[in-house]
Amino acid sequence: MHKKGEYVTYKENGICKIVDVSKDGFYLEPVYNNSELRIFVPKKNEELVAKMMHVLSKDEIDGLIEEAENLDYKWIEDSKKRSEAFTKLLRSGNRVDILWLVKVLSIHKQEVEQSKRSFYATDKRILDNAERIITEEFAYVLGMQPGEVAGYIIQRKESLPKKKKTAAKKTPAKAEPVKKAPAKKPTTKKTSEKKTVKKK
């Protein structure tokens, strides 16, 4: 059970401190929010209490960076369906999913800007919230400034083994000769096979 003075992450509010505990529930205050926001989480609501997650360790952060890189979620073209699905991932509190959101929406933003199209407001809202959640927790755990978090994530990504990337490159290379072989058979191999049958 959570205790007073403990630090947790809660939904899209990022890192919060449990400032008080009563018979009815927990009172949380976001660490990086300058306003006097206080969140009440009723003990009876098990679903909400479950969203009060422990703050990650450095090893866990390094592990989820790798895990997020290997996620195979599909991009949703329909903006409305994408907003609904991505908002659910954001509110789940799962940091792997949230880091994946940062990755794919950042890439999408670059592509949109390069093609001189508009970046949807819903995508921007989700990206901003996802970046804030990841940045605040990583900075808190790693003892660094929020502005240094992006560089740390990039560094960790570059240090990851590239086994999956090389494997992905090999499969198309093997597939090409298979496609070329049937094209040669009608003119050479098939005629020679018929000749051997006639000789016998």
Image: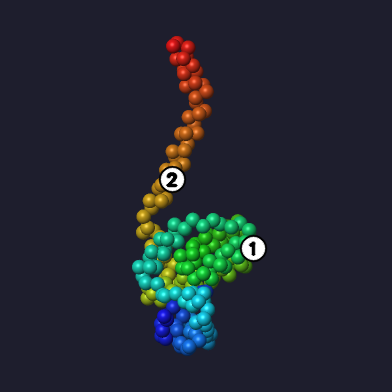
- Where is mark 1, residue-wise? 80
Which residue corresponds to the image point at 46% horizontal and 68% vertical from the top-left?
Answer: 95
Could you tell me residue 83's position as x and y percent? 60, 65
Which residue corresponds to the image point at 44% horizontal and 38% vertical from the top-left?
Answer: 174
Could you tell me residue 186's position as x and y percent? 52, 23
The quarter of the picture where the N terminus appears is bottom left
Q: Amino acid at mark 2?
A: Lys
The answer to which image quadrant residue 145 occupies is bottom left
Dot 2: within a 10 Å radius of its alpha carbon, few (fewer than 14), some, or many (20 or more) residues? few
Residue 35 appears left or right of 171? right
The answer to which image quadrant residue 84 occupies is bottom right
Q: Amino acid at mark 1?
A: Lys
- Where is mark 2, residue-wise? 169
Residue 7 appears left or right of 11? left
Could you tell me residue 111's position as x and y percent? 56, 57
- Regarding mark 1 in the picture, which secondary structure is present there? helix
Give the answer, above or below, for where 137 lies relative to 79: below
The quarter of the picture where the C terminus appears is top left
Q: Residue furthest front?
A: 44
Mark 2 and mark 1: span between their CA atoms? 34 Å
Give the answer, above or below, for where 129 lies relative to 1: above
Give the answer, above or below, for where 143 lies relative to 112: below
Which residue corresponds to the image point at 36% horizontal and 55% vertical from the top-left?
Answer: 161
Which residue corresponds to the image point at 45% horizontal and 61% vertical from the top-left?
Answer: 68
Q: Is residue 10 visible?
A: no
Residue 20 appears left or right of 128? left
Residue 84 appears left or right of 188? right
Give the answer, above or below, for where 159 lies relative to 8: above
